[in-house]
Image (cartoon, coloured by chain):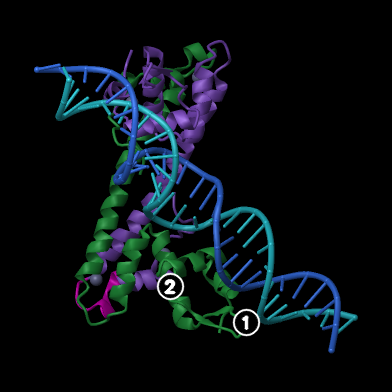
Chain colours: A green, B purple, C cyan, D blue
Amino acid sequence: MLTIGTLSKKTGTKVQTIRYYEQIGLMPEPGRTEGGQRRYDNAQLDRLSFIRHSRQLGFSLDAIRELLDLSDHPNRPCHEADAIARRQLKQVEQRMARLEALRTELKRMVHECSGGRTADCKVLEVLRDHSECLTEHDEIGA
Amino acid sequence: MLTIGTLSKKTGTKVQTIRYYEQIGLMPEPGRTEGGQRRYDNAQLDRLSFIRHSRQLGFSLDAIRELLDLSDHPNRPCHEADAIARRQLKQVEQRMARLEALRTELKRMVHECSGGRTADCKVLEVLRDHSECLTEHDEIGA
DNA sequence: GCAAAACCTACACCAACTGTATCTTTTTCC
DNA sequence: GGAAAAAGATACAGTTGGTGTAGGTTTTGC
Ligand SMILES: [Zn+2]
Ligand SMILES: [Zn+2]
Ligand SMILES: [Zn+2]
Ligand SMILES: [Zn+2]
């Protein structure tokens, strides 16, 4: 039986985060001591490791919820899990494309500025006027 | 004089977002009509365009605040603005490197799964066991 | 002059946590 | 055995950058 602190160390997850996962129903409610402290078993350790590893690969908590559910049913076909992963791959590739465009613009503005007064700063000039950009970049965020 | 709705259309910013920027002090308080409605001038239009364009290039609102401040002082040296842009470029490159690693792993797990039961699913197998990964990917998020 | 469109404030909510305050339980050490 | 320290408990606020909704007021167009 593991305390929450031990589980935290073993998985590299903050104690609060573990309680948060329990709160949103991603981790099951563990057993408790007489005094009310949480105690975990190895199944829960595995589950938390799965969650953390999935997070490191960028899956959302909602996706992880589905993946965990599929993992809990060994006899179901796996195409749903594969679809989730393919979706994630696609999203990663979209983000990369967007970042690539940003990188181009940022590099250009940094390299073209030769210092001086802010009135003549190339960085600020580009920020003021998108027509100086070579690429489009409509969507914000993500 | 522009209404908030006109400003919204001209800059592609939601009305609520404009009010939000005012609330956090990024946009100045505009003039008001007798009845209390906001009215903007061209300087404010420029400022909002600057903010939006900077957001599209991935700058944080805090960074934008600094950039706006620098832009408001034409005689100051511009190295601070350049430093902010270089920092942003670095962050973009870090994110790209991280996404590149994720892409490698995701591609591999998707391509190696040949369908079947979830018990034999390569996707789920990798999520369960990081030792099947080729890269490290410690930090979560961003 | 009246309806519709646009505006107003105030508050709640999103992801995915993290931090803080206050209190209780458990462990450790003499 | 008993004090002190470490760890755990709950509850709630804050983070980033907004978005959505409710309920009411102003402006505009005909
Ligand atoms: Zn410069
Ligand atoms: Zn641009
Ligand atoms: Zn599969
Ligand atoms: Zn891995």
Q: Are marks 2 and 1 in contact (CB under 8 Å)?
A: no
- Is residue B118 found inside the magenta-colored segment of the image? yes
Few, some or many C-alpha atoms within 10 Å of disc 2 (few <14, some 14-19, many ≥20)?
some
Residue shown at 42%/29% (left/top)? A107
- According to the picture, the residue beneath numbered tag 2 turns out to be A27
Few, some or many C-alpha atoms within 10 Å of disc 1 (few <14, some 14-19, many ≥20)?
few
Disc assigned to residue A35: 1
Task: Kindly identify the amino acid type of the residue bearing the numbered disc 1.
Answer: Gly
- Name the image quarter holding the N terminus of chain A: bottom right
- From which residue to which does the magenta span run? B114-123
Q: Nearer the viewer, residue D9 or A92?
A: D9
Q: How many marks?
A: 2
What is the x, y in percent for residue B51?
41, 26
Disc assigned to residue B76: none
In the image: residue A113, left or right of residue D20: right
Image position of B16 with respect to B119: above or below = above
Read off the chain for label 2: A
Q: Earlier in the sequence, mark 2 or mark 1?
A: 2
What is the x, y in percent for residue B67?
50, 24
What is the x, y in percent for residue A113?
47, 19
Task: Kindly identify the amino acid type of the residue bearing the numbered disc 2.
Answer: Met
What secondary structure is found at the residue carrying circle 1?
loop
Residue shown at 31%/76% (left/top)? A71
Image position of C26 with respect to B131: above or below = below
Q: Nearer the viewer, residue D27 or A123?
A: D27
**Taking the image as four quarters, which one is ligand 2 found in?**
top left
- Name the image quarter holding the C terminus of chain A: top left
In the image: residue C6, left or right of residue B81: left
